[in-house]
Amino acid sequence: MMVRRLLSAAVAACIVVTIGAGAAQAQTATSIGSGQPSNDAVAVNQKDGSSLFKLAFSVKKVSGDVNPSNTAVAYASCTDCRTVAVAIQVVLAEGDASSVTPTNTALAINYECTECETLAAAYQFVFGDGTDVKLTPTGKQELHDVKKQLQDLQKNSDTLTLQEIADRIAALAAQVGDVVANNLVPTGQSAAPGQQTTTTSSSTPGTTTTTPTSTTERSTSTTEAPTTSTSTP
């Protein structure tokens, strides 16, 4: 059994941080395009002394044109507050696409905000080589584990600095990309190349075991550098 790995992987990363007060301040980082499926994390904080953390995590398969959108928006209009929005999207593209226009956007806004911290982080991973693919059971479990770590970070973020939160998010997002890149297989196959699978026939006495062989082609990726902005009162 010959296994063909993904030929291309597009990765976009946007991080925006604003710290400060006074007039309206907004920083935006956007990649080109728009479309479906969409994954949105929107955090609007208008309560003084509060902390708000919104997380959106999505894994979707698309066929035909590839026009997904991934958006993280953090808006703060409060005093002594923290606002965080994190959007992580994985898109598995199948078939031939005449249009490939993924959009990845991070927007952080401080409006009439005093001593506030605002972070928006958006990570988008688009994989595809024109064939029908799926994640292995191992890949699905590993993504579940990463999502659980993100949810734990969401619950315990008040014990960390904003920079520590951003670093942790970046590390987990990188893990998402690695998991998908190493656990994609053609539809109908259950294990990734290098993982042993067995099939057993019981139509006659005894068993027959087969182990698939595989060929691997390394994926390529492009990354948009994160942008960071800091303002002081």
Image (spheres, rainbow, N blue to C red):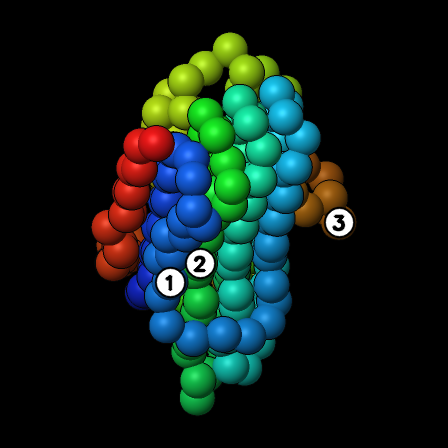
- Which quarter of the picture shows residue 152? top right
Residue 159 appears anywhere in the view: yes
The x, y position of residue 190, in whole percent, is: 57, 48
The x, y position of residue 225, in whole percent, is: 24, 50
Give the Cα distance between marks 3 and 2: 55 Å
- Lower position in the chain sequence, tag 1 or tag 3: 1
Toward the bottom, the furthest residue is: 98
Q: What residue is shown at x 54% (from left), y 82% (from top)?
A: 64
- Lower position in the chain sequence, tag 2 or tag 1: 1
Q: Nearer the viewer, residue 196 or 104?
A: 104
- Lower position in the chain sequence, tag 3 or tag 2: 2
Few, some or many C-alpha atoms within 10 Å of disc 2 (few <14, some 14-19, many ≥20)? Answer: many
The x, y position of residue 70, in whole percent, is: 51, 58
**Dot label at residue 18:** none
Left/right placement of residue 231 relative to residue 155 reads left
Instruction: Please give the residue where the numbered disc 3 appears in the rendered image.
Output: 203
**Dot label at residue 105:** 2
* Numbered disc 2: secondary structure: strand
**Dot label at residue 30:** 1
Identity of the amino acid at label 3? Ser
